Amino acid sequence: MSTWGSPERFLAIGGDAERRARSEEMVAEIADALVAAGEYEARIDAQTTQRIVDFNWSARQAGRRLGIRVHVDIRYSRAPEGQAEARVTPLTAPS
C-alpha cells in the first residue's frame, strides 16, 4: 500500500465549506494510512500557506481520532519547486 497522498487533494479549494469537507476526507485518509502503514506521506502545494495549515490540522485531527499524538514533518528542500513533502508519523504506535 502506498502511503503517498494524491497532490490533487491539496490544489486550490474553492470555499470554506468545500475546504472543510476535504479536510474531513483528509483526516480519514491520514488516519487509515497511520493504522495500515504506520505513516502517511504526501506532496502538497506549498505556495499557499493555508494548504500547509489545512494539512497540519488534518494530521493532528487524525491523531486525535486514533487516540494518539502525531509528528508532522514538512520538508521543502527535497520536493519539486512549489511543493513540499509532508510526513505524518505517530509518536506512539496505533493499536
Image (cartoon, rainbow, N blue to C red):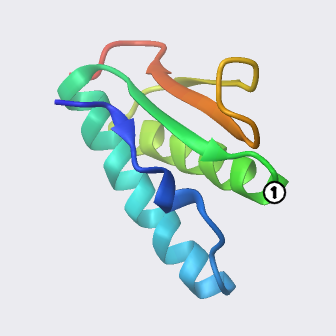
Residue 7, image x, y percentages: 49, 51
**Left or right of 31 in this view: 36:** left
The residue that appears at 48% across and 69% down in the rendered structure is 22
Residue 21, image x, y percentages: 47, 76
Residue 47, image x, y percentages: 81, 51
Q: Nearer the viewer, residue 81 or 38?
A: 81
Residue 42, image x, y percentages: 48, 37
The vertical placement of 59 against 77, above or below, is below
The vertical placement of 20 against 43, above or below, is below
Q: Which residue in the structure is indicated by mark 1?
A: 48
Q: Quadrant of the N terminus?
A: top left
Residue 74, by quadrant, is: top right
SS class, disc 1:
loop
Count residues near mark 1 (Cα–Cα under 10 Å), then give few for <14, some for 14-19, many for 20+.
Answer: some
Look at label 1 and name its amino acid: Thr
**Left or right of 18 in this view: 31:** left
Q: Nearer the viewer, residue 71 or 65?
A: 71
The vertical placement of 42 against 74, above or below, is below
The residue that appears at 75% across and 36% down in the rendered structure is 81
Q: Quadrant of the C terminus?
A: top left
Exactly how many numbered labels are in the figure?
1
The residue that appears at 60% across and 29% down in the rendered structure is 85
Q: Nearer the viewer, residue 93 or 77?
A: 77
The residue that appears at 23% across and 30% down in the rendered structure is 35
Task: Return the residue found at the far front.
Answer: 81
The vertical placement of 74 against 44, above or below, is above
